[in-house]
Image (cartoon, rainbow, N blue to C red):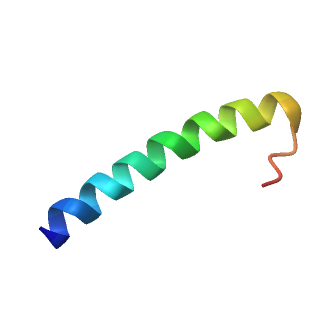
Amino acid sequence: MNRMTASLSQVQIEYLTSQRLGRLATIRPDGSP
């Protein structure tokens, strides 16, 4: 459970992060958080 959950969490986080970075890149080209 823990391993599977961790894997899914990492994938989701990376996916969401990529989308957030894409949107933030439009607003903040420097890539600030």
Residue 3: image quadrant is bottom left
Q: Position of residue 16 (x, y in %)?
A: 51, 42
Residue 20: image quadrant is top right
The residue shown at (80%, 46%) is 31
Outermost left residue = 1
Q: Position of residue 28 (x, y in %)?
A: 88, 39
The residue shown at (58%, 34%) is 19
Number of on-image labels? 0
Outermost bottom residue = 2
Tell me: 12 left or right of 1.
right
Q: Image height check: is 19 above or below 2? A: above
Q: Position of residue 1 (x, y in %)?
A: 11, 67
The residue shown at (35%, 48%) is 11
Q: Nearer the viewer, residue 5 or 11?
A: 5
Tell me: 31 left or right of 8.
right
Tell me: 20 left or right of 1.
right
Q: Position of residue 26 (x, y in %)?
A: 81, 27
Tell me: 6 left or right of 13.
left
Quadrant of the rendering where the C terminus is positioned? bottom right
